[in-house]
Image (tube, coloured by chain):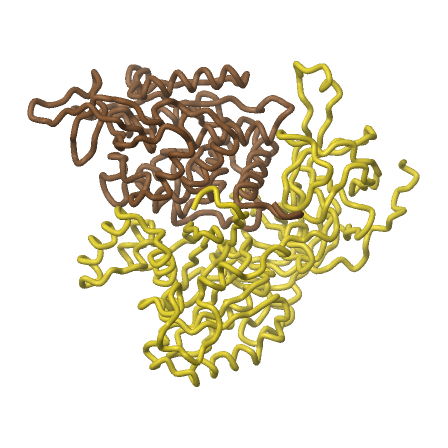
């Protein structure tokens, strides 16, 4: 840093802290969505930077699909406890049980069922704002979304009718029943996230690093073999040295073969990567507009 | 590459042009030639090429992210793209070129360091070119690039390029805001002078577009002259575990101008109370000084009343403070602006009520001249208005400070953002002795 000048990570950090504080100041009942994934780990550090020495003035919220990697949930619970934050977990399983989320017969993925579960949690706690870790570089529909992204009383996003967002003057006004999704990491790239994790020496769940795992080949991807994802008779099963690049459900997250076992290794791997992060997410491959459709319905 | 020895800065730019000037193609070309595209993105492009492009890769498909956009072959909303070279990181706002243009361009360009105005070499300077250049100037974007595109279709004629340059240079002095203006002859489709130097332009001695983006001097784009600190959030630990924090009362915010130093005297406005900076607190460590646009928490020596919406300023270079202000606005709402209507006005960290006391002019975007006393401002119109606010605004002229000179208007009831406003310079400044009795 030469005298009065910010480098790219400092600039992105400043922008995100400003957004977080706007949320704390403008909303009555905000929450911060924390899954334990790398992006929300950065969000938590940014919340500390925005609000310390005070406590983080909002609870953490996670929608548990029941298909999470166990390493992720362990990390999520421990990190929340370390921060002294209140963690609210709402389970898709329970939402199915009480009829809030209705699976289609034969539907294995819990991806779609997260939406009604999340919206029910927002209603239950009357949240008027949810901070999320989505980034615009992840996906084409997200590339169009605002920092402060308005949701109507059905939780829907209307991409053709977004509020103009000018300078750093975020319009945070919502009427009762409506809410805002706020994305402080909008301008961050995958590389920025890892560089920040490295710079801040943030702990991440072990599955981001190289480990041995039994994998099954399906739809051009290596998926982890588990009780809920047993290999079919004619599928190829192999013991591989892998890591996750992005974490979704344990049944849809493709594993990448990788020897990277440190943050520096991961940064070098991303720098040389020739496919995008979401290339390993089966939920996004459903169609060109898969993410757009889910977001319109109230997805993260 | 990561962990490079030198500092990597971020440059934010936006591209503007009319519908077929090749904006999205240009961004696609920058991403493609700087090797910022990944295999799965290329595969997706190649798949869509077979369907829509007759086999040619359509680089525009990279930025058109919504289903309706791909179906109609148009861009609806601002799309943001990210790429990096070893020298800089770039945040690109690709703004659509047709309906609701002004509104979208203002959204995409408000925080840009640089604007690229694309001109189709075959058509020369058209209405849109003047409009885009005017809006870039209105928004106070410091750096301007005129990219003369489709030069291949004009046989790379230097004469054609110079004619277009002369036309711009005839009206640029009237806008008198840009720190630098660069003219570059390119072909976005073929990549000439975008990343790679063209073999067809021996007569052009300037940099390629990317070369310029990588080197244009942006270090002084933030205002570092007069200290401005809109208080965003009062930081008071509830039950601090650390007894040293029992009396902690910090004022958190992002510095919107200038530099603050430990021990410095500051004034809180609008109250006029003065205080001394005791600590520049951050999560990492306390700082001896901090500067725009850092986010910090200031602790004052004195126990004075400060809350969100107040502005802390240095005693030198004081701002204006008034409930009656003049501004240029870009109207963004289908319901037109009419004098007498009330809105919420958000300026720095405060949202207050404001009434439009008069509508003085609408700017003719062709001649740049104000047309006096229109009856209303319709969507995409730019005009000059007067406002009266429920509390005084502590502000600078927009040309001096983009953060303390800007505001938005919000429609009451629907909460929709209706206008972007740029304040005229204050007619009178706060006096240093203001409220001296309060010390």
* Quarter holding residue B248: top right
Which residue shows up at 86% across the image and 51% down it? B431
Q: Is residue B324 left or right of residue B142?
A: right
Q: Where B141 sits versus A162, above or below?
A: below
Q: Closer to the camera, A102 or B83?
A: B83
Chain B colour in the picture? yellow
Q: Is residue B201 above or below residue A50?
A: below
Residue located at (30% from left, 52% from top):
B68
Residue farthest to the right?
Answer: B437
Q: Quadrant of the C terminus of chain B?
A: top right
Q: Is residue B58 left or right of residue A206?
A: left
Please indicate, yes or no, whether residue B80 appears anywhere in the rendered image: no
Residue farthest to the front?
A: B5
Query: Residue B282, percent across and down?
Result: 65, 32
Q: Is residue A50 visible?
A: yes
- Residue B338 lies left or right of residue A213; in this view the side is right
Residue found at x 64% / y 54%: B402
Name the residue at the left extreme.
Answer: A234
Chain A shade in the render? brown
Question: Relative to residue A180, is residue A288 depicted above or below?
Answer: below
- Residue located at (79% from left, 40% from top): B268
Residue B12, x across and y down, in percent: 51, 54
């Amino acid at each position: 840093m030469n005298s009065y000048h910010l480098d790219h990570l400092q600039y992105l950090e400043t922008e995100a802290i400003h957004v977080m504080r706007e949320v704390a100041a403008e909303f009555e009942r905000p929450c911060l969505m924390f899954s334990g994934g790398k992006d929300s780990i950065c969000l938590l550090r940014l919340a500390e930077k925005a609000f310390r020495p005070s406590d983080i003035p909002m609870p953490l919220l996670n929608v548990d699909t029941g298909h999470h990697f166990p390493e992720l949930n362990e990390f999520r619970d421990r990190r929340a406890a370390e921060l002294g934050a209140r963690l609210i977990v709402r389970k898709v399983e329970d939402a199915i049980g009480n009829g809030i989320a209705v699976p289609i017969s034969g539907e294995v993925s819990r991806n779609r069922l997260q939406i009604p579960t999340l919206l029910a949690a927002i209603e239950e706690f009357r949240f008027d704002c949810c901070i999320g870790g989505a980034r615009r570089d992840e996906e084409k529909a997200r590339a169009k979304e605002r920092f402060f992204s308005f949701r109507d009383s059905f939780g829907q996003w209307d991409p053709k009718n977004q509020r103009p967002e000018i300078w750093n003057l975020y319009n945070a006004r919502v009427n009762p029943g409506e809410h805002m999704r706020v994305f402080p990491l909008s301008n961050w790239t995958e590389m920025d996230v890892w560089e920040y994790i490295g710079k801040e020496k943030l702990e991440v769940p072990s599955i981001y690093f190289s480990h041995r795992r039994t994998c099954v080949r399906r739809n051009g991807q290596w998926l982890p073999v588990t009780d809920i994802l047993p290999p079919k008779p004619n599928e190829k099963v192999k013991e591989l040295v892998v890591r996750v690049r992005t974490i979704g459900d344990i049944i849809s997250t493709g594993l990448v073969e990788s020897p990277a076992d440190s943050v520096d290794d991961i940064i070098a791997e991303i720098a040389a990567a020739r496919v995008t992060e979401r290339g390993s997410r089966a939920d996004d491959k459903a169609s060109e507009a898969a993410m757009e459709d889910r977001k319109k319905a109230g997805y993260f | 590459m990561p962990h490079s020895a030198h500092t990597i800065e971020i440059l934010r730019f936006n591209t503007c042009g009319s519908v077929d000037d090749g904006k999205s193609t240009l961004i696609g070309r920058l991403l493609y030639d700087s090797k910022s595209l990944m295999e799965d993105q290329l595969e997706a492009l190649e798949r869509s090429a077979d369907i829509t492009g007759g086999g040619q890769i359509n680089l525009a498909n990279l930025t058109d992210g919504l289903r309706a956009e791909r179906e109609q072959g148009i861009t609806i909303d601002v799309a943001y793209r990210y790429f990096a070279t070893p020298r800089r990181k770039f945040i690109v706002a690709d703004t659509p070129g047709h309906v609701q243009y002004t509104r979208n361009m203002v959204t995409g360009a408000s925080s840009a360091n640089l604007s690229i105005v694309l001109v189709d070499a075959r058509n020369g300077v058209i209405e849109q070119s003047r409009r885009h250049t005017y809006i870039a100037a209105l928004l106070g974007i410091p750096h301007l690039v005129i990219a003369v595109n489709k030069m291949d279709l004009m046989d790379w004629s230097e004469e054609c390029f110079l004619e277009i340059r002369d036309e711009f240079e005839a009206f640029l002095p009237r806008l008198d805001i840009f720190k630098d203006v660069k003219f570059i002859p390119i072909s976005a489709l073929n990549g000439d002078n975008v990343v790679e130097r063209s073999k067809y332009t021996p007569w052009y001695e300037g940099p390629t577009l990317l070369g310029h983006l990588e080197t244009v001097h942006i270090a002084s784009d933030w205002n570092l002259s007069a200290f401005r600190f809109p208080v965003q959030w009062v930081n008071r630990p509830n039950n601090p575990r650390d007894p040293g924090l029992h009396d902690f009362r910090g004022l958190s915010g992002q510095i919107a101008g200038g530099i603050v130093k430990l021990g410095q005297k500051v004034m809180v406005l609008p109250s006029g109370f003065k205080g001394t900076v005791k600590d520049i607190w951050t999560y990492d460590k306390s700082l001896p000084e901090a500067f725009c646009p850092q986010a910090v928490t200031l602790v004052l020596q004195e126990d004075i009343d400060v809350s969100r919406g107040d502005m802390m300023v240095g005693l030198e270079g004081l701002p204006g403070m008034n409930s009656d202000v003049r501004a240029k606005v870009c109207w963004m709402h289908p319901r037109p602006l009419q004098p007498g209507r009330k809105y919420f006005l958000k300026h720095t960290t405060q949202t207050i009520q404001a009434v439009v006391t008069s509508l003085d002019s609408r700017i003719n975007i062709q001649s740049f001249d104000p047309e006096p006393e229109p009856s209303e401002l319709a969507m995409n119109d730019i005009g000059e208005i007067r406002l009266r606010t429920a509390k005084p605004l502590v502000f600078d002229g927009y040309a001096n400070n983009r953060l303390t000179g800007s505001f938005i208007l919000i429609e009451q009831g629907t909460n929709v953002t209706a206008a972007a406003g740029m304040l005229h310079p204050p007619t009178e400044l706060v006096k240093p002795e203001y409220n001296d009795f309060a010390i």
